């Protein structure tokens, strides 16, 4: 089955073609970073308009790279939410229109399920049920993954997402949008002994997170210092350590609590090398396993949507009516398990 994947939930137009017979994934991602950088964050209307401009040329580009025609596509998977509603609508409308024109099934995909399934594209796969840490710009979730479509939220952020904390402090210290990866790079030159930031919510039971207080703490420390390059690197180091330690400690607690041994980490922040290092070491000490998506599939892309679409389609699921599904908000626990 050849599944076309379409992702437009935020500021990346991601298109991919997954061939389930060969396992070949062909993809292109167009990032709108340059458009939004001048504004210091994503401008929803500009995002929608740019998806409109880029989506068809990108679909043509992916088909050409795969050496295929539109008529070879057997099904279309698209992100139906959660995300910026105008942006989601562009991908959903194109997907449903193409599906109608080509007379092939379409399948709506939850953006976070896409992230969650990306590590399953690797050779060595986690075994259900497993624990998942979903960390992106909009989400920080600890999820018990029973099987495809069956998710139990064990913990979530009460305020800012982990990626948001990275991005906001990056902005404060003058890094361009999106600051998370740049802040992580800067942290590598930071002095480990200069600042120590709190690890939020570790002193109380439970699996929820809160990063807003940590962000304020970091901002207050930074404001009192001279804003030279070393101070910026030292703040970046202390912030990254605090976020990574907190995420790792909650994963440890969740693994102990559930008795699960496989941990899947996905979403943009799963690209963070310090987080990978820490969780790998922790998995080793617990005799468990830890899975990450390949780096190019950590942030938003069409491949994860094509693959999640393939998994759902192969269980006999597809869009049933002719409406265009698009949701700004969508709780992952509302998904129907195909089994
Ligand atoms: O999954 P994603 O592309 O979009 C959302 O669904 O939100 O995640 C983007 C988030 C941003 O907050 C970005 O700063 C963060 O992931 N991110 C990182 C790194 N790479 C991306 N944060 C820390 N370290 C990184 N290396
Ligand atoms: Zn995402």
Image (tube, rainbow, N blue to C red):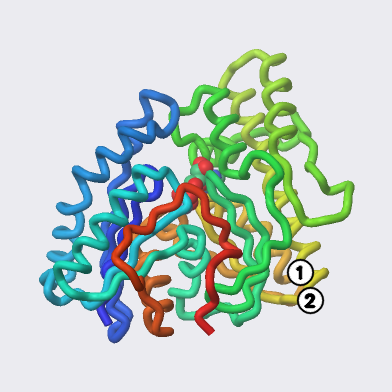
Asked if residue 234 shows in the view, the reply is: yes
Look at the numbered disc 2 and give the secondary structure of its residue.
loop
Rendered location of residue 300, percent (x, y): 41, 53
Above or below: residue 45 compared with residue 230:
below
Mark 1 nearby-residue class (10 Å; few <14, some 14–19, many ≥20): many
Rendered location of residue 134, percent (x, y): 59, 58
229 relative to 28 in the view: left or right: right
Label pair 1/2, CB-CB below 8 angstroms: yes
Look at the numbered disc 1 and give the secondary structure of its residue.
helix
State the residue at coordinates (15%, 77%): 72
State the residue at coordinates (77%, 63%): 252
206 relative to 94 in the view: left or right: right
Total labels: the figure holds: 2
Q: Quadrant of the N terminus?
A: bottom left
Q: CA distance from mark 1 to mark 2?
A: 6 Å
Indicate the quadrant where residue 154 lies.
bottom right
Nearest to the observer: residue 71 or residue 260: 71
Circle number at residue 259: 2
State the residue at coordinates (63%, 51%): 140
Rendered location of residue 120, percent (x, y): 48, 74
Nearest to the observer: residue 29 or residue 112: 112
Q: Quadrant of the C terminus?
A: bottom right
Circle number at residue 120: none
Identify the residue position indicated by label 1 in the image.
Answer: 255
State the residue at coordinates (68%, 47%): 157
């Amino acid at each position: 089955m050849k599944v076309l994947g379409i992702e437009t939930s935020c500021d990346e137009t991601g298109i991919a073609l997954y061939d389930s017979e060969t396992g070949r994934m062909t993809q292109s991602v167009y990032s709108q970073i340059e458009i939004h950088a001048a504004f210091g964050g994503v401008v929803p209307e500009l995002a929608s308009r740019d998806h409109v401009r880029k989506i068809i040329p990108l679909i043509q580009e992916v088909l050409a790279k795969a050496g295929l025609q539109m008529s070879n596509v057997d099904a279309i998977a698209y992100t139906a939410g959660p995300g910026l509603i105008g942006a989601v609508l562009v991908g959903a409308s194109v997907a449903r229109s193409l599906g109608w024109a080509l007379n092939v099934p379409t399948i709506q995909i939850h953006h976070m399920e896409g992230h969650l399934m990306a590590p399953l594209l690797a050779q060595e796969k986690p075994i259900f049920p497993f624990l998942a840490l979903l960390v992106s710009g909009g989400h920080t979730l600890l999820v018990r993954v029973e099987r495809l479509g069956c998710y139990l939220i064990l913990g979530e952020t009460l305020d800012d997402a982990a990626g948001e904390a990275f991005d906001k402090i990056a902005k404060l210290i003058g890094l361009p949008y999106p600051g998370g990866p740049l802040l992580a790079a800067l942290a590598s030159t930071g002095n480990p002994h200069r600042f120590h930031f709190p690890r939020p919510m570790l002193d109380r039971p439970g699996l929820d997170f809160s990063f807003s207080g940590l962000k304020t703490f970091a901002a207050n420390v930074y404001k009192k210092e001279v804003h030279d390059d070393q101070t910026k690197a030292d703040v970046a180091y202390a912030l990254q350590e605090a976020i990574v330690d907190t995420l790792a400690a909650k994963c440890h607690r969740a693994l102990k609590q559930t008795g699960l041994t496989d941990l899947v980490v996905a979403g943009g922040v799963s690209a963070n090398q310090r987080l990978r290092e820490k969780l790998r070491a922790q998995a080793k000490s617990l005799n468990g396993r830890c899975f990450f998506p390949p780096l190019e599939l950590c942030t938003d892309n069409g491949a994860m949507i094509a693959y999640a679409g393939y998994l759902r389609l192969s269980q006999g699921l597809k869009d049933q009516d002719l409406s265009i599904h698009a949701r700004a908000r969508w709780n992952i626990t509302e998904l129907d398990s195909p089994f």
